[in-house]
Image (cartoon, rainbow, N blue to C red):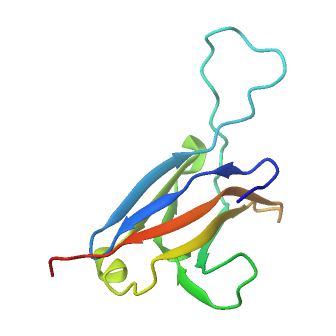
Amino acid sequence: MTDCCTEIYDLCINQGATYSRVFTWFAPSCGPCTVGASPIPVDITGYTAVMQIKAYPLATTVLYDASADIVLGGPLGTIYLTIPATATETFTWWNGVYDLLLTSPGGYATRFLAGTVAVSAAVST
C-alpha cells in the first residue's frame, strides 16, 4: 500500500490471542533542531480515533472495527491499540488493510497509520 505522508505499519494478529501495540505520534523533525535532541510528542488530548480493517481499501464491508479498542494518551502522544482475544478468536478472514484516523477537537483529520493486516490462524483452542 502506498500513501503520501502516512506511516506504513503492517499488523500480524494471532487468532485467539490478544493483540496489543503502543504507537507514539511525534512532531515532525524538520526545521532547526539540535543534534541529538529528543522528538517531541504531539498532544492528542481531545482527539478521537477511528480504525477499521477491510478486505481492500474501497470495500464497503468492514471486517473489524477496532475504534473501541483504542485508548489515546493525551499529552504523551501515545495510542494504545488492544484487540481482545475474544475478538480475534472470531476472525475468519486472513488478510486485509487498515488505516488509523485521528481527528482533533477542531475537526482536523490526520491519517496516522495504514498498512496490511495478516491473521495467523489458531491451531490450539
Q: Quadrant of residue 57?
A: bottom right
Q: Is residue 121 above or below residue 60?
A: above
Q: Quadrant of the C terminus?
A: bottom left
Please tell me whether residue 59 is drawn above or below residue 42 in the rendered image: below
User: Which one is in front, 66 or 13?
Assistant: 13
Which of the pair 54/113 is nearer the observer?
54
Percent position (x, y) of residue 46? 66, 60
Q: Is residue 76 above or below residue 9?
A: above
- The residue positioned 61% from the left and 69% from the top of the image is 98
Q: Residue furthest bottom?
A: 61
Residue 82 at x, y percent in the picture? 40, 65
- Position of residue 24 in the picture relative to residue 124 (left or right): right
Residue 28 quadrant: top right
**Residue 120 quadrant:** bottom left
Instruction: Answer with left or right where residue 90 lies relative to residue 114.
Output: left
Indicate the quadrant containing the N terminus: top left, top right, bottom left or bottom right. Answer: bottom right
Q: Residue at x 69, y 64 (%)?
A: 101
- Please report the residue visible at 39 percent of the width from the left and 84 percent of the height from the top: 91
Left or right of 112, for residue 20 = left
Nearer-the-camera pick, 57 or 69? 57
Q: Nearer the viewer, residue 80 or 53?
A: 53
Specify whether 95 is left or right of 83.
right
Tell how many labels.
Answer: 0
Percent x, y for residue 89?
A: 30, 82
Residue drawn at point x = 52 percent, y = 48 percent = 23
Q: Which residue sits furthest top?
A: 35
Residue 42 x/y as whole percent: 67, 41
